[in-house]
Amino acid sequence: MPQEPSFIHDLNEQQQRAVRHTDGPLLIVAGAGSGKTRVLTYRIAYLIQQQKADPNEILALTFTNKAAKEMQERIQQLIGDEARRLWMGTFHSVFSKILRFEADKIGFTSNYSIYDTEDSKNAIKQLLKENNYDPKEIRPRTIQRLISDAKNELIHPDHYQEKFVHSTLDDITAKIYRLYVERLKHNNAMDFDDLLVKPIELFGEHDDVLEKYQDRFKYILIDEYQDTNHAQYKVTNLLANKYKNLCVVGDDAQSIYSFRGADIRNILDFKNDYEGAVEIPLEQNYRSTKAILKAADSIIKRNDSQLDKTLWTDNDMGDTITVLDNYDERDEANRVANYIKELKARKGYGYNDFAVLYRTNYQSRVYEETFRRKGVPYQLVGGLSFYQRKEIKDILAYLTLLINPDDDTNLIRIINEPSRGIGNKSLNDLLAQSRAQNKSLWRILENVDQIDLYKPAENSVKKFVSMIDELKRDLDNGKRLIDVTKKLLDKSGYMKSLVEENSPKAMSRRENILELQNAISYFEKNNNSPSLSSFLQEISLITDTDKYDEDKPAVTMMTVHAAKGLEFPGVFVVGLEEELFPVGSRNNEDVNIEEERRLFYVAITRAEEVLFFSHCRSRYKYGEEQRKKRSRFLDEVSPDVVRTETGASIKQSNNNFQENKKDTKTTNNNTTVEYDWKQPLYQKKNRSSNNTQIHYDNPDEDPFQVGAKVEHNIFGPGKIISRSGKGERTKVVVYFNERKQRKTLMLRVAKLSVIG
DNA sequence: AATCTAGGGATTTTT
DNA sequence: TCCCTAGATT
C-alpha cells in the first residue's frame, strides 16, 4: 500500500478519521462550517492515492451542479487532471446520463425529453381537460404535487389506488397519475422525478445492468444526505449493495427539503440500514464567530435533536448580532443598503462579502429596485431562471421536436406560437384524431390530408410540417446547431413576430434569445461531440443557483434554501416576520415549524463575522398593506448575542406592536448611519401602477448619469454615453466594452446597475 | 382566429 | 399587484 499522502495533515483528527475510513458504510455527521466539503474532497483524493479505486470507479452525488463543480476543482488541485474522470454531479444529471445509455431497455430512446415542473404541469393540465375535469376546480399544480410525492415515495399508480383513495381528489389523482405515466412514455419524456425513479425500475428489471453499475461504482459518496428522498435512498442503496462502500455526509439540523420529499429518516436510520456502519462527527466549526454560533445553537436546540454532536469553535467572540426594526420593506432594503455601504467604507469589506437572505423569492424585488437606485451592485440568484423564460422554453420546444417528434407536450406548446392560424378549435380536432388513432400528434400532422380539418388551418399545418422536416434534414446532414437554430428562428416567424410587436417586453425577449444563441455556440465550440440531444439534456438540469459567482463584486441576494452550502463574511437575514419566516400556510395547516427553524439555523450559520436580523412592521402583499408581527425566532434566539441598532438588548416575548418607539431617533453608536423610521427614504406617494418604475426622490441620487460605469446582466460592463427622455421614458445610450457596441436602453426596462 | 376586457386567484422553498 | 383565462368582440 502506498504511503499516506502528506495532505492528510491539513485535517483535524476527526476529519482524518473520516478520510482514512475507506471501506464499508460510513456516516459523517458534519455540523455547519465544519469542513465537510474538505473532507469529501480529501477522501476522494485519498481513495485514488491509496489505489483503492480508479477515478472512474468513484461516484460522488451532490444536490447542485455548483457543489459538484467546486468539489471537482478542489480534487483537481490535489491529484491533477485525473479528477476529470470521476463520476460527479447531481443525482439528476448523473442518472440522466445513465438513462441515456440504457433508455432502450425500459422503452424509451436516448433522445428522451426532460420535463421540468412547468412541462409536467402542462401535460397534466392537458390530461385533465381530456378527461373533462375543469382545471380551475382541480388544479394541475395540486395533482402534480401529489403525483410527484407518490413518485418520490416509489408508489406505483396501481398502489396509489389501493393506498390513498379516500376522497374524490385521491380518486382523480390516481386516475391522472396512471394516464400521466402512460402519456410521458408515449411522449418519450421523463420528468425530474423519473430521472430517479426510472433507474430503479431499470435496475429492478435487469440484474445484469444493475451489476454492471455496481461494479462500476466501487465507492459511492453522497453529500447533503439529510435532504435525500426515498427514491434517492433506494437507487443508491441498490448501487452500493455489492461493495457497501457508501459514505454519506449530512447534518440533520440542516434538513430543509421535506417539501420535496426529503426524508430525514434516511440519515437518522443510516446505521440501521447499513450493518457495521461507522459514525464520525465533525464538530469543530471553522466558519463563524462564537456569537454567531451561539445564536445558531440557541435556535436549533429548541428542536428535538437527533444525532449527537456539539459544535464548537476556536474563532473570536465577534460582534453581537444587530436586529433591524423597520417600517416596511422599502425601509428595510434602504437600511440594509446603508449598512452595506457603511461596512464597506469603514471595515474594508467588498460588496461580494455580503449576502441578503430571504424566505421567498418575491422579496427580492424591493431589494433590486433599492440597490439599483442606491448604486449597490448585486447579483440575484434564483427566481425565474433563464431557461424557464417563455421565449427560451418556446425555442427549446422547437429544438426538442426535431429529435423527439412524439413529444406532444412540447409540440402543443409551439404549434401556434407565433400564431399561424392553428387555433384552439383546430388543435382540439387534431388532438381528438391523435387519441382516436392512438398516434402521436406529430404523426397526425404528417398525414393531415387524411382528416377533416378547417382548410386554412390544414394549409398552415402543412407548412409547419415541412418547416420542421426541413430543419430535421439539416440537422441530420450535420449542419451546425447554431445555424439550425438561426434558421428556425427565421422560418418559424418567431423573431419576426417579436420584431413586429416592438414592445419593451418583446425587446427583452429578443435579448434573451440572443443569449440562448450564445449558449448554443459556446456549447458547440466546447464539446467534442456536440449533439442537440446532449445540449438539451444538459441545460434542462441547469439551475440559476449554479451561476452564482463568488468573485463578482456584488452583493448576493438569494433564498435561504439557495444559500445552503455557502458562506459570507456578512449576512442579512431579512423579513423575519410571522407568516413569512416562519412561512404562513394556505389553509392554516401543516407548516412544519421545526423545518422552518432549521431553515433559520441554516441562514444564521452562513455568516462568518457580521450578522443582521431584520423585520418589518408592515409589508405589501397583493398590493395590500399588511401589518406584521415580528418572527417568533427573534424571541427564541439567545438574548445576550443580539442588540438593537441603538445597542440596547431586544425585548423578547412581548407583542412588539405595543412598544412605542415612535419618538426614538435611532442613532447608532458603532456606525454613522443615522435614521428616523418615521421618515423613510422613499416617498410612499410615488407608488404607482408601473412596478418596474424607478423613482428618484432627489435627482442627484440618480446614478445613471452620462459617464457612469454600469453593468447590464447580459451585455456586461459598459459606460453611459448619452441620456435622453424623462421619468419612465428615460433612455440611455451605453457603450459595452466586451461587445464593443453601443445600445440604446430604456432605464425602466434594462436592468442596469452602477459599478465601480 | 385573433384581440380585448374583466374578474379571480396567487407567493413558500427546487432538481 | 400581476398573471391567467373565459367570454365577448372584431
Image: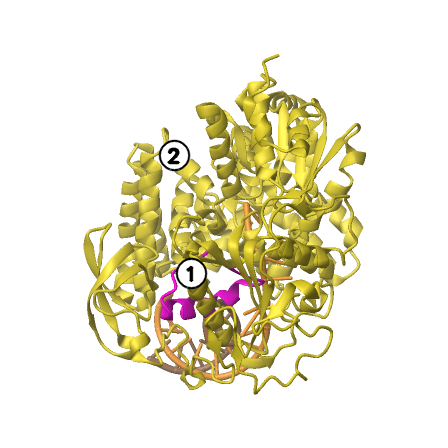
Chain colours: A yellow, B orange, C brown
- Residue A704 position, x and y percent, is 28, 69
| Mark earlier in primary sequence (1, 2) | 1
> Can the viewer see residue A493 in this picture?
no
Type of the residue with mark 2: Ser
Q: Name the residue tied to disc 1.
A: A344
Boundaries of the magenta span? A356-381
In the picture, residue A155 is in which quadrant?
Answer: top right
Nearest-to-viewer mark from 1 and 2: 1
Type of the residue with mark 1: Lys
Quick check: A617 above or below A34? below
Q: Name the residue tied to disc 2.
A: A531
Residue at 43 percent across and 79 percent down: it is: A681
Residue farthest toward the top in the current orientation of the protein: A1
Q: Chain of mark 1?
A: A
Image quadrant for the C terminus of chain A? bottom left
> Can the viewer see residue A652 in this picture?
yes
- Other residues around mark 2 within 10 Å, as few (<14) / some (14–19) / many (≥20): some
In the picture, residue A309 is in which quadrant?
Answer: top right
Does A365 lie within the magenta span?
yes
